[in-house]
Amino acid sequence: MVSRVIPVEDFDLVIFGGTGDLARRKILPALFRRFQAGQMTPESRIVGAARSEMDSAGYRKDVRAALEEFLDKDRPKAEIDDFLERIDYVAVDATGDGGWDELSKLLRKGVTRAFYFSVAPSLFGALAERLHQHGCAGPKCRIVVEKPFGRDLHSARELNKTLRDHFSENQIYRIDHYLGKETVQNLMAVRFGNVLFEPLWNAHYVDHVQITVAESVGVDGRGAYYDKSGAMRDMVQNHLMQLLCLTAMEPPARFSPDAVRDEKLKVIRALEAVPPADIVRGQYVSKSKGESYLDQVEDPGSRTESFVAMKLQVSNWRWAGTPFYLRTGKRLKARHTEIAVIFKDAPHSIFGQSLGRHRNVLAIRLQPNEGMDLFVTIKEPGPGGMRLVDVPLDMTFADALGPDAADVPDAYERLIMDVIRGDQTLFMRGDEVEAAWAWTDPIIEGWEDTGDRPKTYEVDSTGPEEAAMLLHREGRRWREIAN
Ligand code: NAP
């Protein structure tokens, strides 16, 4: 199978924070890959912008080094040379006036302009304001805003207001890279492109849903940032909430930005408040020196959670009575992200035994090895009576569609090209982000008010024992966390 590349129009893309970690690790390699795939027109330009004083030649050297470090394969020198010719650099201070005139002169008239805000969120407002002041913004202009989008409802509202003072909602692209993953879009294809699943996708047939985003890494060098955030703000409010919405939403009338985002918003609004008994927070500990969470952050008495598990109820006709269990954490036994839909038992067993142990499960893997497994119950081959066994109908994309299928664009590649195309379907709308914070805030405030202390869990485990109990008490259990 050969992947189909849909060319995008001519563009100028400015990366504010073009010398930073995200630009070097994700944005520039993603752009190079799209260039390699033939998606960038020869006239399209990329401009790096940050305070550091250097010229374009100096920046190109930095970009080359970043590509060599972060592209694992396929980086022929000639192609990198070609790519670098499309790159410029301007020294700009988001909070000052230096460099703006030079930047505005570099931008071409009449072509799509995208400004990627890959800087600290405290600079988003200043950037938006200066883009306007210096005549860089216009109708064909878009801004891309990285997470975190606020740290509570109040700050998210303020940020939305500041951005909307200068740009309309259809020019603001709030990025959540989980939405750019191939499997996430496949979830929609599976749900809404087949007749098989949608009739069963409700409380009558689904026993419960599990969404797991397990990381094996700890806070590492990000301790200072992470300790002010925690798993609830860093992962649940955005990534897990988005996965939940796509799993639980009603079929949109069409696959268009507002139709999809309207349905996601309804899910967030239908979430019931979560009682404290339905949430478990955790913090990792290790017997090895320097490996515990508290060794890696500044505050030795920090109560920030590196793990959250919770039971949610989506209160609408489709999902009444079917719980959604979410969990995410750092330093868990494996890196593993999946959405698993666990269907109910068959209503009657003709085999003289309960079928309870054997259930259909649709497991959608986001990482590693993006793909899907549909577990069906069959007879174990051989003599000796009717013994049942669950086998996966494996839909690993590479096996089903050929090796090229595994070589799908990374989430950033897809999302940046969507910005250029002007497609907001996979970006969060302002009201969605606010609704997610409105649901998250009371939970976090409750912890702060009561001085709640996270339970401890061993590194390389599956999280605190209490998280297992969330399901055990209801006769369920978490799926394995495994590579
Ligand atoms: P970083 O490594 O600290 O880079 C920050 C960038 O901003 C640098 O290029 C810096 O260059 C520039 N900068 C700082 N102050 C500036 C100013 N006043 N005017 C213009 N440029 C300025 O940060 P990062 O990790 O790349 O993160 C960037 C954004 O992405 C943050 O909002 C972060 O939360 C978000 N994010 C990052 C990741 C990640 O994996 N790194 C993941 C998700 C989201 P100079 O010092 O030369 O100005």
Image (tube, helix red, strand yellow):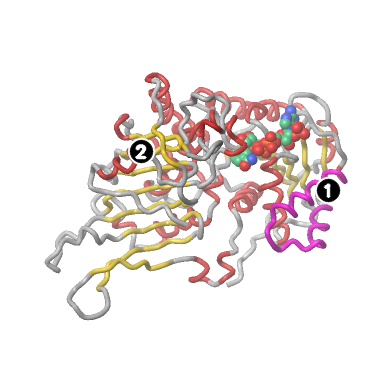
Is 66 part of what is drawn in magenta? yes
Q: Amino acid at mark 2?
A: Met
* In the rendered image, the vertical position of residue 390 relative to residue 192, given as above or below: below
| Residue 117 seen in render | no
Q: Is residue 69 left or right of residue 158?
A: right
Residue denoted by label 2: 310
Q: Is residue 327 left or right of residue 299?
A: left
Residue 342: percent from left, percent from top: 31, 54
Which residue, given by chain and number where applicable, does mark 1 sit on?
A: 61
Image quarter for ligand 1: top right
Q: Which stretch is magenta?
A: 57-85
Residue 224 in the image: above or below residue 340: above
Q: Are marks 2 and 1 in contact (CB under 8 Å)?
A: no
Verify whether residue 111 appears in magenta.
no
Q: Nearer the viewer, residue 318 or 165?
A: 318
Residue 428 picture location, percent across and down: 52, 40
Q: Is residue 399 left or right of residue 93?
A: left
Compared with residue 176, is residue 299 higher up or lower down, i.e. above or below?
above
Could you tell me how far apart the alpha carbons at marks 2 and 1 are, in whole angstroms?
Answer: 47 Å
Local packing at callout 2 (Cα closer than 10 Å; few below 14, some 14-19, many 20+) is many
User: Depth check: 458 or 216 in front?
Assistant: 458
Q: Residue at x 78, y 24 (%)?
A: 96
Residue at the (30%, 49%) spot, across then down? 477
